[in-house]
Image (cartoon, rainbow, N blue to C red):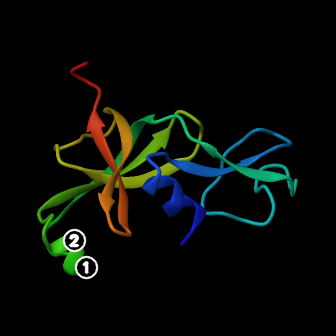
Amino acid sequence: MSAFQKGLELGRIDLPCCNGCGRFHAPARLACPHCGATALQNRALRTTGTVLATTRVYRAPDEYHRSLVPYTLVLVAMDDDVILMGHTPEDAAIGDRLAAAPSGSQGAWHVQFRSLNDD
């Protein structure tokens, strides 16, 4: 299981962060794609961001996702300057502010977003 998946199981969204420049990146790499440093550690990501793109899914790729259909996938520019993909039950629009949280169970974890526009 990846460090990302382990973090989701523990209720966190953890991504590699460079000890040199302090920037997050995904997917995990052996060196920071921003500055080339190799001193990296997983850190909890801030959970808020802005929607860049959305798509509505009507045909699931596997058995786990069939129970979720229809669902919306979003690409979100997180406030920590990294892009995450996740699910949202709402009809999110480009520019909406969302908050992320781990969702799932028994090894089938994903990032679930909820709207901050009404908060």
Give me the residue at 29% from left, 54% from top: 87
Query: Regarding mark 1 in the picture, which secondary structure is present there?
Result: loop
Q: How dense is the environment of label 1, judged by Cα within 10 Å: few (below 14), some, or many (20 and up)?
A: few
Name the residue type under label 2. Answer: His
Q: Nearer the viewer, residue 46 or 51?
A: 46
Q: How many marks?
A: 2
In this rendering, which labeled residue sits more in front, label 1 or label 2? 2
For residue 65, the mark is 2
Q: How dense is the environment of label 2, judged by Cα within 10 Å: few (below 14), some, or many (20 and up)?
A: some
Outermost residue, top side: 119
Left or right placement of residue 2 versus residue 20 in this view: left
Give me the residue at 59% from left, 36% from top: 80
Q: Pointers 1 and 2 in contact (CB under 8 A)? A: yes
Residue 119 vs 89, above or below: the answer is: above
Q: Nearer the viewer, residue 96 or 110?
A: 110
- How far separated are the C-alphas under marks 1 and 2? 7 Å
Name the residue type under label 1. Answer: Pro
For residue 61, the mark is 1
Give me the residue at 25% from left, 18% from top: 119
Query: Regarding mark 2 in the picture, which secondary structure is present there?
Result: helix
Q: Where residue 89 appears, x then y in whole percent?
A: 18, 48
Looking at the rendered image, the quarter that the N terminus falls into is bottom right
Left or right placement of residue 47 versus residue 36 in this view: left
Quarter of the figure with residue 4: bottom right
Quarter of the figure with residue 116: top left
Q: Where residue 26 appears, x then y in whole percent?
A: 60, 57
Q: Where residue 62 appears, x then y in whole percent?
A: 24, 81
Left or right placement of residue 65 versus residue 110 in this view: left
Q: Where residue 17 appears, x then y in whole percent?
A: 71, 47
Left or right placement of residue 29 versus residue 88 in this view: right
